[in-house]
Amino acid sequence: MDGNFPRASVLSVILLSIVLSSSAAFLKPYDLLYDNAVQAFYNSDYKNVVHYMEGALSSYREVRRTKVRCRLRCQDQHPLDKTSDLRFFDVVLRRAACMNKCIEEKLGTQSVHKVSEDVVQDFNRRIPYNYLQLAYHKLKQPDKAAAAAHTYFQANPEHVEMGENLEQYKDLQGVSEDHFVDREARPHQISFAAAVKLYDKDDYEGAIVLFEEALVEYYKADVVCRALCQGPQRFEGHDHLRYRYSLHELVSDHFTQVLHCEHECVRDLATRPGRLSPMENYLPLHYDYLQFAYFHMDRLEDALQCAVTYLLFHEGEEFMTDNVNYYREMLGHDGEPREKAAWYLRRHKQELELLLLGSKIMGVEFSEGNYWSNTGGREDSNRIPSGTDGWMEYVPISEKKTVAVAAPQRLTEGGPLLYDSVQLVQSSVALNGTQRVLLDHVISEEQCAELRHLAHAVTMAGDGYRGRMSPHTPNEKFEGATVLKTLQYGYEGRVPMSSARLFYDTSERARRIIESYFLLNSTLHFSYTHLVCRTAITDLRMFTGQQDHRNDLSHPIHADNCLLDPEANECWKEPPAYTYRDYSALLYLNGDFEGGEFIFTEMDAKTVTASVKPRCGRMVGFSSGGENPHGVKAVTSGQRCAVALWFTLDPLFREMERLQADEVIHMLDTQSLLGQGLNINPKDEL
């Protein structure tokens, strides 16, 4: 194997080693520690799983802290000067240089700490804690395993197996209620939840301390959130071609994105882990509770101030206005709102005005959410919503979101299948939904086998996903590749070029069938194409040791172009969802495994409306919106392989790798017609 190891890969390893050695005194990158932990996990080296994974979490937190400290310091040192364009750009560049220097002094070379979006998402979804709870359990440290499991479950409440594990931990010796802590809980949310509990017990003095503490922590968290917005932005939904030659427009676009990110911090700070929508009325509710708590403690001056502050968010609200009038009458004078809250709300309104202006100039749709909406709650003698365990039952902010609907086409189907071998198995009616289809014999048994071999070959060649644990369940690992990667490996002789070409042709075949069957009146473009195999892992069950009893899903219920919110029975069409995707398809390559059925559900993510058993050549296609929530049942034995395809009707969101692959295929075909050999440098073309 050493003799065949690609020179480029050797060079990459050498360069990485040099960079890491030169940064040895600095923080180790968390993606490298994470990868070491995963490898240790598959080697059953659970001590090193804990060592590396805890190190990765620590490194991740330190990177965030350093970025916040450096950005805030450099903002103070280089305040923006708007008196002229040159001074403005001078400050922007000096601030950037300041931040780079500050960060590298603390962390080392910044390039070492740049991680893939997949790893970032793993940490956002608390995947490391899934590994940790398994490792701590194997090391017979149930208290730490319980904490890791609880932390993971807070952000992944739909994970059935983790819920079962938590119930098992409660019965284990050495585990108490105090061990079930959320290691990622934010201070302002902890204090607020504790304050509500004390308030409900009529401990108003203790509640006041914690509510005031929660407010202090809230405003600190707001500063941190805004500082984290100061990095590079993703410009989804923008036509960059028209900004190509305008520096002013590029800067305007960037700062509008930063401003939008900062404006959304109010949503982030009010969002509970595992929820898509924020708790309504979150910040004003602090002042609501406080004014009654101060009233019960006979501190009417403070009660009046908090009541007036609450009215900043809900001007003219009847109940609070009555309270303010009562306090004024008792005290004999008026009151002023808290300056911090008044300033916070003024800034929020100013940001909104700028965002509405910017969206109009750049032609980007923007609508503001009613973040302070007060939908009520229980009304006791004090009219305080309570019984919440620190969190009210939230109602999604419908004013802000756009409910996902099917692609902007006439909802028709039944068009030609284009290929003689393809057979219609079930239409939307039989699948109990809309814009759904199930087809058989899309490709042959021989082609299925060749594509499965291709997935393994790419992984063995050192790419794909290196057999890492599935991002959706710890009981499976996955491997796979994209079309461009397989073509690259075909050029390099690491996989048969004929197999790479088959992958390309098969995906095009699937695209044409979906476009034709659903009678689309415009071209369907590739958004992403993915050849992937998922394999059940043995001996990873926490307490049963068997895959057969799994209740988790191989892929949780979701929609492809919106954020599914089962509790609200809605699907929010907003980032980070891939809002530009219009149609999806899964082409199965085998059926010789246990479990792994594809399921459609209602928006509640529980009521199954249709189930599809995979088999070679079978393809399920559907529109990508909230009308088609779907998921995959656990693969309990064997390996499930498929070609996953997502399509868009918007050419601006065509898959760039696909366009490159098209060029390579065109060149291949041209050279074949001319009888020329392959005399190109793959790296020049790919």
Image (cartoon, helix red, strand yellow):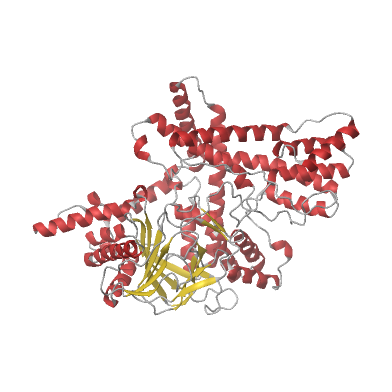
In the image: residue 582, left or right of residue 403: left
Q: Give coordinates of residue 210: x percent, y percent.
A: 77, 46
Residue at x-position 48% and y-position 53% = 577
Above or below, comparing residue 324 to residue 123 in the picture = above
- Judged from this view, the residue extending furthest toward the left is 675
Q: Is residue 230 visible?
A: no
Above or below, comparing residue 658 to residue 477 in the picture = above
Q: Is residue 424 visible?
A: yes
* Depth check, front residue: 679 or 524: 524
Above or below, comparing residue 592 to residue 33 in the picture = below
In the image: residue 639, left or right of residue 149: left
Residue at x-position 28% and y-position 52% = 659
Q: Give coordinates of residue 668: x percent, y percent.
A: 18, 57
Q: Give coordinates of residue 388: x percent, y percent.
A: 74, 56
- In the rendered picture of this protein, how many numbered marks are placed on residues? 0
In the image: residue 249, left or right of residue 656: right
* Depth check, front residue: 150 or 268: 268
Q: Which quadrant: the N terminus?
A: bottom left
* Depth check, front residue: 630 or 488: 630
Residue at x-position 41% and y-position 32% = 249
Q: Give coordinates of residue 88: x percent, y percent.
A: 47, 24
Which image quadrant for residue 313?
A: top right
- Judged from this view, the residue extending furthest toward the top is 83
